[in-house]
Image: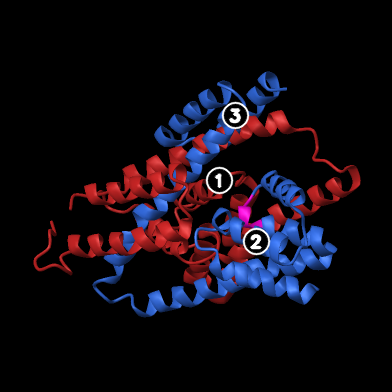
Chain colours: A blue, B red
Amino acid sequence: MILQILLTFSILSLVAIGGANAVLPEMHRQLVELHGWLDDATFSQLYALAQAAPGPNILVASVMGWRIAGAGGMAAATFGMLVPAAILAWYVAGLMHRLRGAAWLKPAQGGLVPVAIGLILAAGITMAEAAHSHGVMPIIVVAISTLFVWRTNYSPLWVLAGGGVLGAIFLG
Amino acid sequence: MPEAPPPATIIPGPAELFAGYLKIGLFGFGGVAAWARRVIVEERHWLTERDYAEVLGLGQVLPGPNVGNAAVMIGRRFHGLSGALLATAGLYCAPFVILVLLCLFYDRYGQLPAVAPVMAGIAAGAAGMVIGTAFKMAGKLKLRPEAVAILLLATIGAAWLGLPLPVIVLVLGPISIALSLWRAGLIGGTGAAR
């Protein structure tokens, strides 16, 4: 069982182009439809649980592993999800280092920059849309926070804390 | 190309690398990419804006979380294998511990702690933080018009059309690389360099 979890998440790790949100549909297919380890409702609940923690969303895998098979499942899922992709990144970094003299390398890498920034922007917009489901107040917070982070160099902690306080007052 | 001279960068020691990534993981609520850029470029000056964007771009097209891939590559650049391991461990250890605690809480009480309103407010702040970070990066990197077009296409595809991210990356990535090589005068005859 643990071995199967390790294998399943290792495969997910290597198809997760775009990170956690990109791999979610395939994760659902594997865990709910193919293996029947989780039902639909549990899958959604666990996703929400993972969102409540800080850090990379990919740790949603850890929560799924924990629900499927306890601590061992959690360890297997986390290891499977993180390690294959990390090994690939390690070897690609080595390849880039060997190619560093090539004239085309910097412009080619630069070509990936707008895609990465565009996807960050999309993630922010998707988060803002989710926040909008709580009414108008969160949208005001989004707007202020956007300007604050964009136009100043103060720590974003201020807008996160401010958002939390406003949420407690107006959404409680 | 008129560009300000890159600000001096600092090579972090192993402990600083770990501590920096610990902060990214711990504070990276809802938007770890925004915090990673903040800590690495603005606060600690490990990499220039452009260097970081390029590592992140590469991390984006590889499978796995872009920030996680960038941690491996940045850690490797500074301290080889131990750097990659320290950066990765720093990034994941705090969120992982918090997640274990949340799981235990959930097991015992069958629900999450009653902090939903606070979380909703923080999530709104985080959304703005992520959007603001994208604007800031795009502005500081002085993107060319064709790069801005690619950026917007990626955003529209992911946020409004709901296209799968691998599709966006595999379609826009090669186009954008080709445009960038053309701009540098490396393909398409004389190109449009300078």
Where residue A125 sits: x, y (%)?
48, 38
Residue most toward the top?
A: A170
User: Marks 2 and 1: which is nearer the front?
Assistant: 2
Does A62 sit above or below residue B23? below
Q: Give the residue pinned by disc 2.
A: A29
Task: Please state which amino acid type lies under the numbered disc 2.
Answer: Arg
Q: How far apart are marks 2 and 1 (CA)?
A: 26 Å
Task: Please state which amino acid type lies under the numbered disc 3.
Answer: Ser
Task: Please state which amino acid type lies under the numbered disc 1.
Answer: Gly
Residue under the image location 70 percent in, 28 percent down: B117
Q: Are marks 2 and 1 in contact (CB under 8 Å)?
A: no
* Camera sees residue B27: yes
Residue under the image location 59 percent in, 23 percent down: A135
Q: Distance between the residues labelled 3 and 1?
A: 19 Å
Left or right? Give the position of A167 relative to B130.
right
Q: Give the residue pinned by disc 1.
A: B31
| Helix, strand or loop under label 2 | helix
Where residue B189 sits: x, y (%)?
10, 68
Q: Give the residue pinned by disc 3.
A: A133
Q: Are marks 3 and 2 on the same chain?
A: yes
Residue under the image location 43 percent in, 33 percent down: A152
Where residue B121 sits: x, y (%)?
63, 29
Q: How far apart are marks 3 and 2 (CA)?
A: 27 Å
The part of the image, by quadrant, that contains residue B192 is: bottom left
User: Marks 3 and 1: which is nearer the front?
Assistant: 3
Residue under the image location 73 percent in, 22 percent down: A172
